[in-house]
Amino acid sequence: MSETKAPRRKARARRAGVTMADVAAEAGVSMQTVSRALREPRTVAPETLELITAAIRKTHYVHNLAASVLASSRSMTVAAIIPTLSTSVFAETIQSLSDVVVAKGYQLFVGNTDYRLDREEDLIRSLLGRRPDGLFIVGTRHTRGAVSLMKRAGIPVVEGWDLSRRPIDRQIGFSNTDAMDAIVRHLAETGRRRLVFAGVLRAGDSRARMRRDGFVAASERIWPDETPRLVDCSDLALTMEDGGAVLERVEREHPDADAIVLSSDITAAGVLLAAMRRGIAVPGRFAITGFGDFEFARHIIPSLTTIAVPTRRIGAEAGRLLLDLMSDAAGTRREDGPKTIDVGFELIVRESG
Amino acid sequence: MSETKAPRRKARARRAGVTMADVAAEAGVSMQTVSRALREPRTVAPETLELITAAIRKTHYVHNLAASVLASSRSMTVAAIIPTLSTSVFAETIQSLSDVVVAKGYQLFVGNTDYRLDREEDLIRSLLGRRPDGLFIVGTRHTRGAVSLMKRAGIPVVEGWDLSRRPIDRQIGFSNTDAMDAIVRHLAETGRRRLVFAGVLRAGDSRARMRRDGFVAASERIWPDETPRLVDCSDLALTMEDGGAVLERVEREHPDADAIVLSSDITAAGVLLAAMRRGIAVPGRFAITGFGDFEFARHIIPSLTTIAVPTRRIGAEAGRLLLDLMSDAAGTRREDGPKTIDVGFELIVRESG
DNA sequence: TTTTCTGACGTTAACGCTATCAGAGCCCCA
DNA sequence: TGGGGCTCTGATAGCGTTAACGTCAGAAAA
């Protein structure tokens, strides 16, 4: 046993250890052929493919995608950034996005900002570190650094939910302002005069703020002589529970109100149910409107007037858009196709107002 | 300009292009120092760190984690497998898991099976391809191949939500059977005699099936002479909408029923609200019970008797467990600590029964 | 028969980073 | 004053895969 002939032992700690080389040896082919069998099975002969498949089974090989990413500079990965998964609308958007891209072999990285703009930039940076082939992000308001990161990443970026004047790349969403305008108009048309906006506005939730702004703009247009009634609920949580507190504030600050406009179905349901519990007639005493058309909105008693938002469609369309853009060879990014897709919204008039 | 001295141009197409070498050159240090600055900032001198930070800013460098994974065989990634993100409970579990592991620098890969066991194995394989450092998976029922994959992966695996006799590695959850037993006992103690189980059972949802089994077992124990009343709702969707259909079936098939037991708050709320709409007294005519203690359960009128499940705690504990296990040097996996964490459940008695 | 083409596979050289070891400079204490 | 231990930095050798190109046999075309 000569020293020189001893197999070089790796000093480095190894994790599991079956590599493509092992599979290749087992199947009696080169690594490249194994690689081809994995990525383009049609380019290897059927018998060879069989050999390789058997070898993979026997060795329990699992393709190391990290190495694959490095060598091919394609990660087959899409990154998605949302405020939180806890809100069902975003979870649904992500689910739809996932359905679409997973069908084409992509995997999904999700990151959530918890509505904190300052976290977003770090999150984007660390997600981009994985070299995703595409990026989906909820919202169109970002820090300068975040925008710069996304623009320089060299991958398609789709912003969702909001619409802004200058999207980074593509955007898909609807106008929160217009939606609130539709609500206010509807209330005015059904005889309401003293509307109160009492939406819970979380710091960092620019969509909710746009709804408030939409409320103010519409109110000022319809009732130019009045100051729009706003109740500050920024200290409250976006829960049904806090709907009771919202109701109390409205009654205290605007005892003459005849409609309560919320920025989410959650709060709206909370207000509505609190009102029912306390024997306040809805829509007799107040009209109540929500936002989002959550599942319970049509079922609670009285059912909730609200804005239906195509959450799933946003995710699905974003996925399709990304697939489309990712399929183009890098550098050959087609600049055709609309920059903006407006998926619209729908005013759903129900019993509550 | 001699031919031999010309810099070797890469024939290969390059994506973006700023590498650590560029940063190192800009900062006038070696790549290794840049690497250290990124992963262990405390081990480089403050002035050097400053130089490197400036160089990173100037070059707009984004750390390539794919290469990092390959070189270090740590991906700083956790994979999570759930049935679907569309159900808020799983979204919440994932959110909590994410909160815990992201705080320690990990990123989350999510994959969903859509309640299809056959997809699970492929999903696991492709997620393992990313070489995650840990894996969280909802459920304890898996195919043989899936189990084999997870066992061979050489990483900590936490199964969540269910409890099984033989976990793959660690498990955290509660007994669905016991929870249903608690509901049946409660109904019996409050004078109900003719309970009907009408839960919507999706194929692949073993948890819902366990609840039905729990119902059957408890009923047979309490009323040994009777056949447990089951209404088949396997063709219905798990939506509030279909609660109306559930109610009709119960009334048709078991007109003498005095309690309707559901396997989800969603259906329960649907049944309850359909009953209210039709003027059927709850809990006068029927008691109605749900499962999950969703947000609306305590707010709808009448409020819903249900089982509270610590969704968030499951995610958070799973995250902590994974962090714990991942921090141990590979190979040095400690085998101490409990294999099973039972997070329990709570029967919440409200107005509906 | 020679040439061209095609399909199937192999060889080589990266991809961009980090583990490891080694070395340089510095301070401290016997 | 000479080590012994620090702290900080650099050179080297991979990590496991794939792109690009090369080879080679056999079919098709000339």
Image: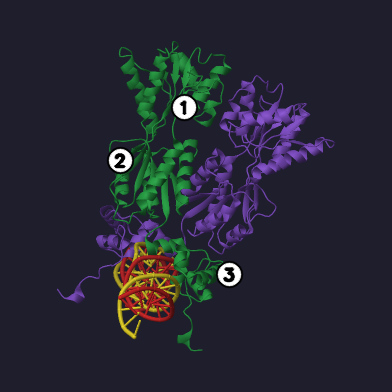
Chain colours: A purple, B green, C red, D yellow
Against B46, residue A336 (above or below) is: above
Would residue A329 be visible to someone looking at this image?
yes
> Is residue A334 left or right of B202 when viewed as pictured?
right
The amino acid at mark 3 is: Lys
Pointer 3 residue: B58
Q: Which mark is residue B236?
A: 1
Pointer 2 residue: B167
Please tell me whether mark 1 sits on a helix, a strand or a loop: loop
Chain where mark 2 sits: B
Please tell me whether mark 3 sits on a helix, a strand or a loop: helix
In front: label 1 or label 3: 3
> Is residue A4 left or right of A157 when viewed as pictured?
left
Snapshot quadrant of residue A6:
bottom left
Against A276, residue A19 (above or below) is: below
How dense is the environment of label 3, judged by Cα within 10 Å: few (below 14), some, or many (20 and up)? Answer: few
Against B331, residue B23 (above or below) is: below
The total number of labels drawn is 3
In front: label 1 or label 2: 2
Please tell me whether mark 2 sits on a helix, a strand or a loop: loop
How dense is the environment of label 1, judged by Cα within 10 Å: few (below 14), some, or many (20 and up)? Answer: some
